[in-house]
């Protein structure tokens, strides 16, 4: 029988204390693909894009007022870049920060409560694949909304739909500077030059490069610098309403609300562009869509996605045969994601005898919380601060590549000590009300070793027993 | 009575002084050499950090960004970024060296591949599974081999056959000694967890009293690093990670903040290490540079050639990477002299500069150092 431990930890987010026993773990996983809820209760309760955009606009207005009142204090600060310390302090009290904190708490609450942990793991996987990072000021408020509105609704559909939703969300457009990229020969740039401005706004190739390198084809797959530049030109015109300053904002369509993704034709680089040997002569926003659709079904993309999924569900060095099956599946179905998940569940390579991966701080914390009927953390626990301490700040990987997905990424000596310290703290709070000896076989199932069972049984207190369980080799892994 | 109390007081002072003197004398006689590698992840803009203000093409290419270069004039050609005040002081004291127009063997523009080459020391991405610092450890005497990264896991640069500890500042309450001992027993047969846990325990013992320091700004990080390197059984080789150098937009404010942090980090290292600073080499390097021209969003895009920085009291003694110097075989910034028409053209390999500095610092045979650190160079 396939391992219940692997189904629960490798595919899921850890056994819940009230999970029913199952004698068919694979069927349990496949059922979850149908029961998946893209908008579960904790997330449905959050405010939408308009409220987040309003908070950002208000913040910008405050800043402008501050600059008028105390020009020296803000003279060197830059509204688009990393906030500096005093500004961060202010920000931490502001509405933008509150959106981030509430969204992070909702993400955690949902991961702990969900009856469909396999799809939830896939949400986290895709959110990290199409990573934005909330260390850039305009991204902070939108980071949660990005996962909830661009990722969650599309994880069971086509890869191309997921790609287009991710690329078009304001968080991505702001994070990778697309919102400020102007076609160098666009009507707007021409006009600015005609007026004799020293430096016309221009092209920013950040989003174009990362779509090719990270989201679709993968690095070193044959595209050139010229392809990146041409793709950056194709993407011009795509921007976010209401959140920036300067020429672009005056051209927003009349009906656009702050925070809407919009296409502004006068910012778009006119003419056909050639990318990887193919010419795209479409006009306006259709041009970007045509390129994205081609990138989404490119064989290099199939291989890239197959490799990353295989690694996530079988270990650092996935078997070439598994990658090949996923790749063929991707190409045959035109990037049908549910089909890939079914292939993974059926793959013998994903059901190896030993847990091959080391849980990320997120995986580990969520699995601790799922195992307990009592709340593991206090009501006043600041969720983002906890994950920052553990080394994996939520929606803040610090780079568009997201967090690495290797054993060496998370298995560090400091990381282990931090987990043991947090396990001790949780044990101190509730250890006297939980019997780790009964919990161990329930949550580690077939992976409970004699050594761990003995260590738990011989602990000097119930709290120490619980800490030993959460720090045991099988619980640290997946 | 009064006399007796006075006497006791004086005795106490005498004892304290007697205890301190020999320790100090040992330290002064032969402090082991120390190495700090500060990686700048994200491609730091060498053209803004050590600005070639004397290049005739500089001001036009850099536009508004050229105004950043208001700091110390290093020589006729180069000006240091205004945020590097401590760095300028070290330069005047012949304890700073800047190597310009350098690059690793990597010639594309992906951060992750570029960092892989910078850390691994290979000629292509993903060629090496260990790093140049990790391989250096095999050349060092046992007393100088203790290595530590301020990071949650071991960065590639430090990976290799020698054990390396990691330390990430934690504000969580510490686990008790009995639990730690039981976990040591539980991990005894686990090939992955056993060595990680051993070094976690050892580091926690060393770091005991700095748990409250979260290392979030440069000065704290430098202070923390110095406190981990100063004890007799502390780290001798240290790696510090810094991010946030990828300034595609709004570069002026962001880079100034970054460099202020780096400057304080170096200043805090110098202050914290005290006399040991004289036997310390700090290497600051990034995966590649940034475009000569400014982009449409007040930033710069991924480039090639950049600048590396070297700090430490030992540089005042001269050598191939001597303090108080900028070394560069300057290619010029005019469009015709750029790489691919856009980047600062690298004229020396970063590997050769780091190799020479390391060989001199440890008084090792330069050829052997190059062969171990950078076998493909």
Image (cartoon, rainbow, N blue to C red):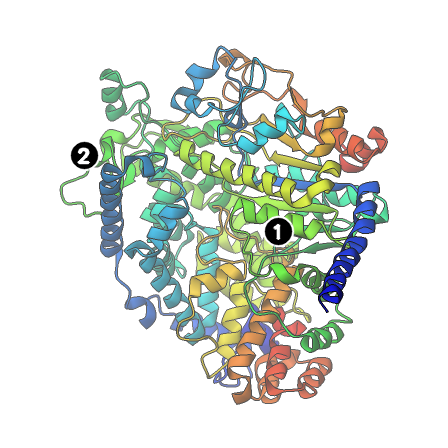
Residue B335 in percent (x, y) is at 49, 13
Q: Nearer the viewer, mark 2 or mark 1?
A: 1
Residue extending farthest to the left is: A254
Is B127 left or right of A470, judged from the image as shown? right
Instruction: Give the side of residue B42 with respect to residue B295, left or right.
Output: right
Residue name at image x 32 percent, y 38 percent: A74
Q: How many marks?
A: 2
- Name the residue that disc number 2 marks: A250
Q: Residue at x 50, y 46 (%)?
A: A301
Q: Position of residue B261 (x, y in %)?
A: 52, 41
Residue B224 is marked as: 1
Residue that appears at 69% across and 42% down: B274
* Of residues B25 and A141, the one drawn nearer to the viewer in this rendering: B25
| Residue at mark 2: chain | A
User: Looking at the rendering, in which quadrant would you find the N terminus of chain B?
Assistant: bottom right
Q: Position of residue A316 (x, y in %)?
A: 64, 56
Classify the position of the C terminus of chain B by image quarter: top right
Q: Secondary structure at mark 2?
A: helix
């Amino acid at each position: 029988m396939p391992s219940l431990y692997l189904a629960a930890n490798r595919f899921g987010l850890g056994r819940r204390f009230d999970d029913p026993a199952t004698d068919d773990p694979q069927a349990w996983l496949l059922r979850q693909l149908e029961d998946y809820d893209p908008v579960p209760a904790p997330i449905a309760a959050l405010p939408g894009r308009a409220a987040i955009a309003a908070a950002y606009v208000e913040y910008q207005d405050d800043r402008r007022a501050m600059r008028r009142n105390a020009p020296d204090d803000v003279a060197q600060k830059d509204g688009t870049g990393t906030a500096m310390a005093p500004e961060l302090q202010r920000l931490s009290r502001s509405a933008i920060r509150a959106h981030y904190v509430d969204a992070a708490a909702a993400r955690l609450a949902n991961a702990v409560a969900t009856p469909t942990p396999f799809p939830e793991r896939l949400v986290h996987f895709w959110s990290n694949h199409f990573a934005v990072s909330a260390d850039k000021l305009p991204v902070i408020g939108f980071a949660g909304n990005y996962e909830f509105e661009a990722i969650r609704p599309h994880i069971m559909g086509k890869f191309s739909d997921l790609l287009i939703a991710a690329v078009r969300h304001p968080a991505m457009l702001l994070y990778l500077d697309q919102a400020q990229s102007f076609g160098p020969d666009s009507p707007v740039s021409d006009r600015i030059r005609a007026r004799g401005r020293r430096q016309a706004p221009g092209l920013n190739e950040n989003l174009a490069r990362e779509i090719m390198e990270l989201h679709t084809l993968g690095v070193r797959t044959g595209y050139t610098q010229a392809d990146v530049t041409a793709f950056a030109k194709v993407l011009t015109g795509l921007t976010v309403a209401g959140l920036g300053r300067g020429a672009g904002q005056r051209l927003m369509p009349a009906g656009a609300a702050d925070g809407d993704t919009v296409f502004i034709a006068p910012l778009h680089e006119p003419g056909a562009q050639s990318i990887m040997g193919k010419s795209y002569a479409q006009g306006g926003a259709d041009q970007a869509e045509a390129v994205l659709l081609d990138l989404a079904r490119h064989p290099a993309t199939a291989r890239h996605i197959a490799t990353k999924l295989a690694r996530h569900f079988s270990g650092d060095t996935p078997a070439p045969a598994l990658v090949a099956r996923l790749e063929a599946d991707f190409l045959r179905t035109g990037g049908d994601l549910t089909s890939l998940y079914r292939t993974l569940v059926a793959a013998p390579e994903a059901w190896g005898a030993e847990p091959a991966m080391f849980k990320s701080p997120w995986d580990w914390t969520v699995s601790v919380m799922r195992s307990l009927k009592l709340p593991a953390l206090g009501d006043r626990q600041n969720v983002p601060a906890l994950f920052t301490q553990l080394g994996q700040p939520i929606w803040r990987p610090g780079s568009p590549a997201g967090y690495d997905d290797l054993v060496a990424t998370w298995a560090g000596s400091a990381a282990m000590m931090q987990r043991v310290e947090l396990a001790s703290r949780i044990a101190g709070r509730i250890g006297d009300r939980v019997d780790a000896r009964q919990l161990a076989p329930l949550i580690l199932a077939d992976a409970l070793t004699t050594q761990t069972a003995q260590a738990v049984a011989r602990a000097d207190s119930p709290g120490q027993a619980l800490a030993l369980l959460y720090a045991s080799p099988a619980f640290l892994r997946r | 009575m009064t006399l007796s109390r006075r006497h006791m007081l004086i005795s106490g002072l005498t004892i304290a002084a007697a205890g301190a003197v020999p320790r100090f004398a040992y330290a002064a006689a032969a402090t082991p050499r120390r190495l700090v590698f500060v990686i700048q992840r994200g491609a730091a803009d060498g053209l803004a950090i050590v600005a070639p203000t004397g290049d005739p093409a500089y001001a036009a290419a850099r536009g508004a960004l050229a105004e950043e270069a208001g700091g110390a004039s290093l020589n006729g050609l180069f000006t240091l970024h205004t945020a590097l005040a401590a760095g300028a002081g070290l330069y005047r004291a012949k304890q700073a060296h800047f190597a310009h127009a350098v690059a690793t063997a990597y010639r594309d523009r992906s951060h992750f591949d570029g960092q892989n080459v910078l850390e691994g020391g290979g000629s292509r991405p993903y060629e090496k599974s260990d790093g140049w610092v990790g391989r250096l450890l095999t050349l060092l005497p046992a007393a100088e081999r203790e290595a530590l990264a301020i990071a949650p896991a071991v960065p590639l640069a430090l990976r290799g056959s020698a054990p390396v500890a990691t330390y990430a500042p934690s504000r969580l309450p510490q686990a008790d000694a009995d639990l730690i001992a039981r976990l040591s027993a539980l991990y005894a047969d686990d090939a992955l967890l056993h060595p990680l846990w051993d070094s976690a325990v050892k580091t926690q013992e060393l770091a005991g009293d700095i748990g409250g320091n979260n290392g979030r700004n440069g000065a704290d990080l430098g202070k923390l690093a110095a406190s981990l390197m100063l004890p007799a059984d502390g780290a001798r080789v240290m790696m510090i990670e810094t991010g946030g150098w990828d300034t595609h937009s709004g570069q002026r404010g962001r880079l100034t903040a970054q460099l202020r942090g780096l400057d304080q980090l170096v200043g805090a290292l110098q202050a914290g290490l005290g006399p040991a600073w004289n036997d310390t080499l700090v290497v600051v390097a990034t995966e590649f540079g940034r475009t000569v021209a400014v982009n449409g969003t007040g930033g710069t895009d991924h480039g090639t050639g950049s600048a590396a920085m070297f700090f430490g009291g030992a540089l005042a003694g001269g050598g191939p990477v001597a303090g108080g110097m900028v070394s560069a075989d300057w290619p010029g910034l005019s469009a015709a002299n750029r790489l691919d028409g856009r980047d600062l053209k690298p004229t020396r390999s970063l590997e050769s500069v780091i190799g020479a500095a390391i060989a001199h610092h440890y008084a090792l045979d330069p050829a052997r150092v190059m062969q171990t650190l950078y076998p493909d160079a």
